[in-house]
Image (cartoon, grey):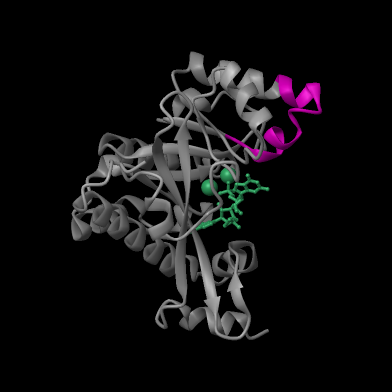
Amino acid sequence: VTLLADLRQAVELGQFVLHYQPKVDLLTGKVTSVESLVRWMHPRLGMLAPDKFIRLAEESGMIAELTAWVLRTACLQAKAWQDANLAPVRVAVNLSPFHFQRQDVKQSVCAVLEATGLDPTLLEIEITESALMQNDEYTCRVLRELREMGITISVDDFGTGYSSLSYLHRFPINTLKIDRTFILNMMKSSEDQAIVTAIIAMAKSLKMQIVAEGVESVDQLEALKDQGCHEIQGFLVSRPVNAERVARFFTDED
Ligand code: G
Ligand code: G
Ligand code: NA
Ligand code: MN
């Protein structure tokens, strides 16, 4: 009941923190990108995961302020890594469909890139498949503009949204992230295995990069590698961790 009141002050009080989860190229073993995942350090309730407050933020309109904070923080962090001469990795930010519909996304992204000095090629935007389906024309135009700036566009949770595939080639998509429910079941369900195979084949013929989410076992890694999947993300590589710890995955030592 008071969570909304707390949320209204949380940005101002500096209670949010970003964790980062790496995506790794299966051929080179190198980190290509790190996904920023927000957590709320609530003074009484402890660390809250996004499923506890993103919907509330969307419904209350607080998502705009929260997303602005996430975008700025992620870009500042990526710039700091770049300035420290770490191997270049993109930082990925999840954009809520709500935010995408209501805010001038291009304008806020441009402002953050300018303020932080981050190279646009080091920024990636993740939007869910269902967000892509809403408000077609407008979404398509904004994504094109972002893509033309050099920003990477990824479709999150692919396979769980609408089943119409006709939209795929109309959007400037770089990457499909196969939803982790398919990966979870692929070793025990031949149907899920078939879906994963089909998504990989389709992404390849559309010249898209393919990332498997939620990879937890070596068996899954091997099967995905055999199928020609490009990248994996999941607990097998790393859970989402703080900025310092994720940077260990792309420093040159070892
Ligand atoms: O690790 P995890 O519990 O963090 O993520 C749960 C869900 O919350 C995922 O679907 C993820 O995409 C979403 N999420 C995490 N961080 C953000 C964020 O900064 N903005 C939005 N809109 N969603 C996020
Ligand atoms: O929707 P999105 O893909 O952005 O969600 C990311 C969520 O998935 C986060 O809650 C993150 O903690 C979780 N996650 C990431 N990797 C794994 C994994 O290997 N296994 C499981 N079960 N969850 C994962
Ligand atoms: Na995501
Ligand atoms: Mn996802």
Would residue 201 appear left or right of 147 to someone viewing this image?
Answer: right
What range is drawn magenta here?
178-194
* Whole-percent x, y for residue 149 in the image: 25, 39
Q: Is residue 82 above or below residue 147?
A: below
Name the quadrant containing residue 150. Answer: top left
Quadrant of the rendering where the N terminus is positioned: bottom right
Q: Is residue 49 left or right of residue 189?
A: left
Main SS of residues in magenta: helix
Please name the residue shown 70% across and 33% down the image.
Answer: 182
In percent of width and height, residue 68 lies at: 37, 64
Residue nearest the observer in this picture, 56 or 152? 152
Ligand 4 shows up in the quarter that is top right
Membership of 11 in magenta stretch: no
* Image spot of residue 25 (x, y percent): 45, 30
- 136 and 47: which is toward the camera: 47
> In percent of the image, x 27 and y 39: which residue is there?
121
Q: Which image quadrant is residue 171 in?
A: top left
Q: Is residue 174 above or below residue 83?
A: above
Residue depicted at x 65% and y 40%: 216
At horizontal 59% and vertical 16% (from top left) the residue drawn is: 226
